[in-house]
Image (spheres, coloured by chain):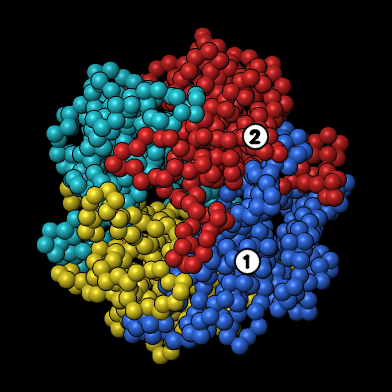
Chain colours: A red, B cyan, C yellow, D blue
Amino acid sequence: YGKNTIKFLRLHREGKKHFVKEVEVCAHLRLTSPQEYLEGNNSLVIPTDTIKNIVLVLAKKNGIPSLEEFAIDICNHFMTTFCQVAYVKTYVQEVPWQRLHEDGVPHIHSFICVPDGIRFCEAEQCRNGPLMVFAGIKDLKLMKTTQSGFEGFYKNEHTTLPERHDRILCGELFCKWSYGECKDFDFNCIWKKIRECILEAFAGPPDCGEYSPSYQKTVNCIQMLVLSRVSQVQVIEVVLNNTFYNVVDMKNLGLTNDKEVLVPVEAPYGSCACTLGRKKFFEA
Amino acid sequence: YGKNTIKFLRLHREGKKHFVKEVEVCAHLRLTSPQEYLEGNNSLVIPTDTIKNIVLVLAKKNGIPSLEEFAIDICNHFMTTFCQVAYVKTYVQEVPWQRLHEDGVPHIHSFICVPDGIRFCEAEQCRNGPLMVFAGIKDLKLMKTTQSGFEGFYKNEHTTLPERHDRILCGELFCKWSYGECKDFDFNCIWKKIRECILEAFAGPPDCGEYSPSYQKTVNCIQMLVLSRVSQVQVIEVVLNNTFYNVVDMKNLGLTNDKEVLVPVEAPYGSCACTLGRKKFFEA
Amino acid sequence: YGKNTIKFLRLHREGKKHFVKEVEVCAHLRLTSPQEYLEGNNSLVIPTDTIKNIVLVLAKKNGIPSLEEFAIDICNHFMTTFCQVAYVKTYVQEVPWQRLHEDGVPHIHSFICVPDGIRFCEAEQCRNGPLMVFAGIKDLKLMKTTQSGFEGFYKNEHTTLPERHDRILCGELFCKWSYGECKDFDFNCIWKKIRECILEAFAGPPDCGEYSPSYQKTVNCIQMLVLSRVSQVQVIEVVLNNTFYNVVDMKNLGLTNDKEVLVPVEAPYGSCACTLGRKKFFEA
Amino acid sequence: YGKNTIKFLRLHREGKKHFVKEVEVCAHLRLTSPQEYLEGNNSLVIPTDTIKNIVLVLAKKNGIPSLEEFAIDICNHFMTTFCQVAYVKTYVQEVPWQRLHEDGVPHIHSFICVPDGIRFCEAEQCRNGPLMVFAGIKDLKLMKTTQSGFEGFYKNEHTTLPERHDRILCGELFCKWSYGECKDFDFNCIWKKIRECILEAFAGPPDCGEYSPSYQKTVNCIQMLVLSRVSQVQVIEVVLNNTFYNVVDMKNLGLTNDKEVLVPVEAPYGSCACTLGRKKFFEA
């Protein structure tokens, strides 16, 4: 019944070169007995202050080689140290600091924040169960300005949406995938590869793109490409929060607007959340 | 696979007196076949634009006597109108407009926004299943400045938190409860009664309060009081996001601070999420 | 060249009854010499950490009888203690905790957060100049559902807005007024009186309201009423960020919508910022 | 007395290649007479709806070659079209869409949002006065993990901050500069050059950095470098909102923390706002 959010920075130096990771960690524990909740007996409760100390101590001792290894490290510590812990889940999210470059030369100790998709991971374990590892990317905003439509949908007396074969497809992506029980992957390398798959599946070939008949289908394409290219991924969930753009009608202003000026429609926006595994199909 | 958020205002007039409800509605549909997702076949898809039109038409035709009745109305419409809908969930949230008063006199058409806890509800139904109704309150911020402590917790080498028997208890509450399948309640009246139970259980008697040995126990007290006083509630979930306050150490400034000046500790904050039903116990 | 934001809680007890003020304080200092900025010489710089300590110590020693008295107290301290300070401005904002009531009975130590307009104040002083006091309210959201229109505006070939004589007037108000150099007012009492004036001028008489021909005119009415009723106010600035609501056109859905269902238009919203003094007229 | 915010997307095609600019535009007008405010006479008022139409029409007709040229275009239109406009200010801000690359190959119609510093500009003009152009960057987050200290500051009985010669310097930068009355610059090229100056002045040489004795001095270095390298800049204002990081004391946890684990101190944070011109010195 304990949970917390800890934000901190782990600095690592090799000679004069600095490496920095700033992370936000949430740890969620469930105890074997809810006695503090039912009876006000706190004797098994691990205070959030203690949880914070443990996270900081582990970061100090073992560093953060990858978010995933750090999340696994925290899970293992709680499971092996506290017999009153029935379940532990650790979420780790990165502040996207990138090394600064001047005229192409990397700076030894300066960084810039580039939030073009936030990396995160999760590790969770029940006592006597396997440790499961998840990773993901969120707040990734993408747009394609053509090769997207929405036609042939169901119509009745409440339908006012016209069919469109050349609209803007723009949205914010959340992707989360499972690595199953495996822990010895090169998590940093795989994460980059998956990010590239997502961009490629969304955009299509650089010279011509690929037609998207709906954002649901684009979500499916992203999942299919990741599963086909990255064997370590067991299941992948994708949520696409779509922003609609309307071509501004300029007829009464005496102009023909050939999809040159568009305004975003803030509400309602569409959202599509699907989960795809290797053998079976889930809907979330 | 469709979801959307629709914000609108429903104005109702009785003579010169105006009544206003501004709501945000999310409707989530699952279709019987994911063919648009797998094959790019949109023929069963109900566009978010159509969903929006339906919600607005229902608000126009039937009004919003209570959030719950409106959510039920929407669910019923989708289930009875579209045979391709396998599941529907409707979430309705209120903008907390209150009638303005001048010297105690209610104004006939002016309102002020008072966000001291936001009312929301949910209705959901699977095809051939019962329609379930939920309601709740969120963003309710409460504080008690004494009669709260945290002692006797588990300690090891990573523990630095001192025991405290007179701390501040401050947090943001989220409560959500189930009415089961019933639909004929006076939802507005019950909601107010439950809100009063929550405040009373958090604060204790007005003249002396009641000691809270942990925020987990306070969560349990809230749930127990609601279940004992409001027979229509089947299950109640409570999440308390706790803000810690530290008494500022003023010794090196030459002063004794007898719990007079405190600073909020923004992270880590504690969170307790529990669900309590009439017969069995769940943990969320 | 120093500025900071300090959030803290001041608890005051009278017998068993508790009184709480949670405030956010920003202090802005300008030094007589910019030598730390130009030459990297820090010898006159007062660190933000020291500023924070001073604010907390003053709160501990003198309490917060009103936001204004506390802001004046801080200004005075900096001016009299540090001869290198050329200018000081203090901003104080309140977290809107209200005493909780159970069946009308006030609770001795429990509070609820009711953000229906946030109270703030400012005090500023240049060395050898007068100490000026300002106060205000912000994030005050009001709506009137009739007695508002917008007609007779300028039209040309780019005009598409229809004239309206019965629209919704809804917006967020920011009001800030000056008390001049005076410091001995009952600031708490005057603030409440001004808040009532604002509500009354916005809404008009409870039984019939008052027609607003534009939100600009409503802003003027608010200013005029405050200046006429509250003699301590020298100058008053009002900003009204207007939210537009459009009546949904339901003709193509086969319905007549008699201003019953409206949707907010998030952008563009209108904004009107005006400052009115006792003798002269300023525009901000 | 009119102001508005308009968000839209301008799409431009050259053959199959697409170019996209998504911008937010605020236009602020002051009229020659405040009669709508004082008398409720709207006959000179230009509705925000008309302003929106004009902005969209100008974007359609002339495109957005640079934010600055677009802002100038809008100013000119209002000044030459409406004789009741006494003053106009236009603010234009960019959504940071960047062309997507796959294996180094640019995509013809896909984009990713990369918010590593937001570009904006302003143009303003009084009737019979010159048109002034400003540009800037905001929300630029930078960090250097060494070569920063804060020593030799003023101390008294309220000082608790220790001197530090090797701290983290981390903050969010806002820079705004004036181009004076000139309008024929290559605004896109100059903006990139200034951004590079800011990064270079903050970080110092890539191989060793440069010691910052205070963030005030770093602000001055940024201004000096921009003014010395970019002759088109007349005046430059820089605001640095500093985030402090504390090295976690791990002594009571039995560990020595050699600046490896640090936690951000959310409040108070420091802020330094300075304006530097070619000949004279202003403080903001």
Residue type, mark 2 in image? Gly
Q: CA distance from mark 2 to mark 1?
A: 31 Å
Q: Nearer the viewer, residue C196 or A237?
A: A237
Q: Is residue C208 left or right of residue A108?
A: left
The secondary element bearing badge 1 is classed as: helix
Q: Is residue A104 above or below residue C146?
A: above
Residue D244 shows which numbered tag? none
**Residue D195 appears anywhere in the view:** yes
- The quarter holding residue A68 reads top right
| Residue lying at the far right of the rendered structure | D207
Task: Please determine whether, in this image, residue C60 is positioned above or below residue A229.
Answer: below
Q: Residues within 10 Å of mark 2 (few under 14, many from 20)?
A: many
Q: Quadrant of residue B98?
A: bottom left
**Residue C162 point in image, percent of width and height:** 34, 69
Which kind of residue does numbered mark 1 sit on? Asn
Q: Is D180 above or below relative to D13?
A: below
Tell me the residue that label 2 is attached to.
A204
At horizontal 33% and vertical 81% (from top left) the residue drawn is: D40
Q: How many marks?
A: 2
Q: Which residue is located at x 34 percent, y 60 percent?
A: C245
| Left or right: residue D266 compared with residue C198 | right
Q: Nearer the viewer, residue D52 or A97?
A: D52
Q: Which residue is mark 1?
A: D62
